[in-house]
Image (cartoon, rainbow, N blue to C red):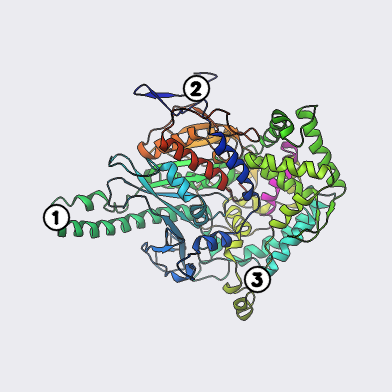
Amino acid sequence: MEDGKHHSSSRQDGEYIWPRGRTRRSGSPTLLALTVLAGLSWWLFPISYWDIEAKASASPASENQFSWTQLTPSESLEYHDCFSGFQCARLDVPMDYHRSDGQGARMAIAVARLPAKVPVTDPRYGGAILINPGGPGGSGVAQALISGRNLQAIADATVVPTDTNHSNLYFDIIGFDPRGVNNTTPGFSCFPNLFSQKNWELQAEADGMLGSSADSFMRNWQRAIALNPACSQAILTPSVDGDALGKHTNTPPVARDMLEIIERHGEWREKQGFNAQRQFDQMHGYDPQQHILERIKWHRGREKLLYWGRSYGTVLGATFAALFPDRIERMLLDGVVDADKYYTGIGPEPIGDADAIFDKFSIYCNEVGTKCPLYAAGGPAAIKASYEKLEGSLYSSSLPVRSSETRGPEVVTWSDLKIVQRISVYQPLAGFTYLAGIVSDLLKGDGSKLADFKHSRRSPTCPTEECLIAGPWSSECAAPGQNEVYSTSAILCSDAEYMQSTDEQDFKRHWRNLQELSSAIGDYWAHTRLNCAGWSVKPKWKLPGRLPAPYQRSRLTTVVPVTANTSFPILLVNNILDPVTPLASAKKMSHAFPGSVLLQQDSEGHCTLAAPSTCVSQAIRKYFQTGELPMPGTVCDADLKPMLGAPKKPQEGKTPDDIALQEAVLDEAQRFRIPLPL
């Protein structure tokens, strides 16, 4: 025990197991580290959900791509092959679970399942882990396609199931699109068609973010007041028998959808058991104990959740735990949001560590010396001064950039630089190196890299023929795969009703406070509340004790915290330095769920997967496999540090499975993407 922290290592049969803590620093082979660091920059150039699914559905054996419209919604999970190795279904659920008349609108939840490496009838089948990537507004289907195999490799007993040990478990990974997100229907649009949406977004880019100029506040405020009331009205129409999507997109109904998914998965699992048991009986004679069927039978009304949520996904997980505390088998929360702060606004702002992370940019740059293009003899202070000089220069005067072979001319601005800075503190492993190159070039008057980045974030489009025929505001003109920003508002502004009543002066004070807290992301974080100003949708299902709207602290009497005694302890993991989900939030939420354990990772960035750690991944695997929790106070090292890479000497004595696990962790760091704003 040291400084109140437990650093664990372990031996088994006289040999070291890869350490659980910092007694022996976990590293990665230098070649692997260099490969990952070289490849990490792709996520800096965002792609839409459409792009992800189009690539995943492309099949060399067929010219036909998978389309969700091919699937008929069903009240049971009816899986169909999709996306090369996945199975998809559309689960029919009530829009309003509290209606007792059996009437009302219905939802079709898009579900993508990566099957376990063993059949569901195998004794080693461990169940289905539901995942959520964050947001709010993130697509679980997209996360499954991007990360499902890596998450599966981390949770599974071994990467390749070659043994017959029945205690070794292998899991399905299930991603689903929450209400109002991506492929789940009905969807919504804040614009008559995608073309007008992209025009609006290009105008936002031209106007600049908060803090970009002397009049940036008024321009951004007016844009919010133009968009938000109309967008919230759009999500309230059409109404079916009194039900409107906007009243049912907040987090509690999504938690209830998760309960429905695990129940219907149990039903589906039992059907597979019936078929397998019948085949066994036909081949070997009737089994009076019905072992196969008994092992995987549907526990009707008692199915329990296996869950892995990141960022906002931890709010969803905590909400599920508060509503259904007896239905948890495993729950892993990474990058932990203070759920009470999220719902009520009461408590410290979460961005207090963001500038400390950005200070690491200068420190790491100094440590690698001339390998960092911003290295200066004056050390970290001189490096930071170079960045601040550039930021001030771009604030005063943007930089014109000539066209290239792949893009037209651009003008790069203060806002463009701040976007890259924000990305760098969210994911420093790739972001710091990328930012250093951009800043170095800009200081020399070369804005081509930043112009390339700016250009890559756009996806202009023209109306499709179907849209032109159907007309504005039709479903043919909607683009659910490119609606993430507006899905975020639909969920967040309903969950956090207090944000809706923000007036101009209240918001200005809020913005100034955030600027004081963080020069790195204070302006960006203020947009979170700005996106709810003028929003008017009130959710029908609220957690007990949430704040009424309009929000007035003086009238607040009671707030019921998000807390519960769960049927199985929750594992929380968090970076020591996280820009928007600070360690303090994780500690608070751990106290809210008795028996839970917080595992800390000594790294910076948003969520532990921003910096791969085999130590953390081994703890996650053990938790899903056996339910064993780390010792309270355990701190894990990351395998890689921004700019510094990995230790020079690879760790000795690793098994092939250790190496395979490490490769999965490193690959997941490369693929890792957190939807905004959390």
Report the Cα–Cα distance between label 1 and label 3.
60 Å
Q: Regarding mark 3 in the picture, which secondary structure is present there?
A: loop
Q: Earlier in the sequence, mark 1 or mark 3?
A: 3
Identity of the residue drawn at 20% across and 59% down: 279
Report the Cα–Cα distance between label 1 and label 2.
53 Å
Residue 561 is situated, as x and y percent measured from the top left of the image, at 51, 40
Q: Mark 1 is on which residue type? A: His
Q: Mark 2 is on which residue type? A: Thr
Q: Give neighbour class at mark 3: few <14, some 14-19, many 20+ (Cα, 10 Å).
A: many
Residue 436 is situated, as x and y percent measured from the top left of the image, at 73, 40
Look at the image and say whether residue 532 sits in the magenta stretch: yes
The span shown in magenta is 514-534
Reading the image, the residue beneath label 3 is 193
Reading the image, the residue beneath label 2 is 23
Q: How would you classify the magenta stretch by its main secondary structure?
A: helix
Residue 548 is situated, as x and y percent measured from the top left of the image, at 59, 50
Look at the image and say whether residue 96 sits in the magenta stretch: no
Reading the image, the residue beneath label 1 is 284
